[in-house]
Image (spheres, rainbow, N blue to C red):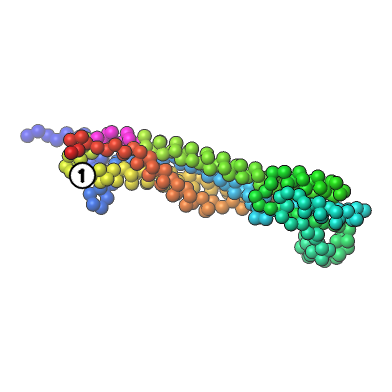
Amino acid sequence: MSKANPSASSKQLEAHKSSMRLPGGWQLPPFGVHQVLAVAIVAVALWSVSLVWLALQGGEQWVGSWQEQVKVHVYVDEQYKDNVNALLESLQDVDGVEDVRQVSLEEARDWMEKWLGGGGLDAGNFTKHLPTSLEVTLAEPKVDTVLDDIRDAAVSQSGEVNEDELQLVQAGDVLGTIRSLAWFATLVLALAMALIVSNTLRMILLARADEVHLMRLMGAKEWFVRLPFILEGLLLGGGAGFVAWLLVWPLIWFTSDWQMNLGIDLSGWSLFLPLLLGGALVGGLGAIIATANIVSPETES
């Protein structure tokens, strides 16, 4: 009697343990170094994408609620108060301005009291020294030259524009451009990640070519053969997304003091589903690409 080869038996046992059985007879391919590397590379790529979106989230919070309805204030000193009506009409004629109104003293006093924080000071004494203020509401979509036109109208009537608010409006344009670039970078990286998963699964598929060929000869449908690899792609992508999400938290905790100083509050939870589902989608796409040509000529009629 021939003795069994111990090394061969151990290899078969190891291969059996490294495979995952699914209901219905499906079996996921064995997990190895290629899958681990794929998860690590995709996780780093997703983490990089998440940093871009976190930075965009912080920028939008720092800019504030002006995005919903952009407003700019124009101030007129007491010595030029006779120019207020002319300035108001000039601002209303600017293309891209939706509305112009004069801020009342009562409204200015209420704002001053809130700004003082209830310190017991008489806001009325401060209010009477404030310049006349005109509130300009910009129309949407914003006209490119509206800010320069508002500044020119203010200067022509000895008025002064709140330059900080103009910078916020300009920051909004920059954030819009950054958001578009972020989407473009996300799509490009998603395609690259899908190709990484595809190459990984393709190598596994080639290693199991004989098994796939046998299954096709026995009458297994193409979808039945492809499904374990697609499930593995979803698992690899989703796992990479989860790892990327975990890597986001140390950065958020490390910058907590900096966020507090800027008045922003970055949320890692808002990235959980996008990273998890996005990773799974990328992995599934890579698996579909890798298994696109699972056919056996002997079984085709």
Identified at 45% across, 47% down, the residue is 278
* Of residues 225 and 87, the one drawn nearer to the viewer in this rendering: 87
Residue at which label 1 appears: 220
Q: Does residue 113 appear anywhere in the picture?
A: no
- Indicate the quadrant where residue 283 lies: top left
Q: Residue 226 location, x and y as percent?
A: 28, 43
Q: Position of residue 148 (x, y in %)?
A: 76, 44
Residue at point 34%, 41% (across, down): 288
Specify start and end residues of the magenta stretch as a single range. 200-209
* Circle 1: residue type: Ala
**Extreme residue in the right direction:** 79
- Identify the image quadrant of the N terminus: top left
Residue 202 located within the stretch drawn in magenta = yes
Q: Position of residue 223 (x, y in %)?
A: 27, 45
Residue 43 appears in the picture as rendered? yes
Depth order, front residue of 54/289: 289
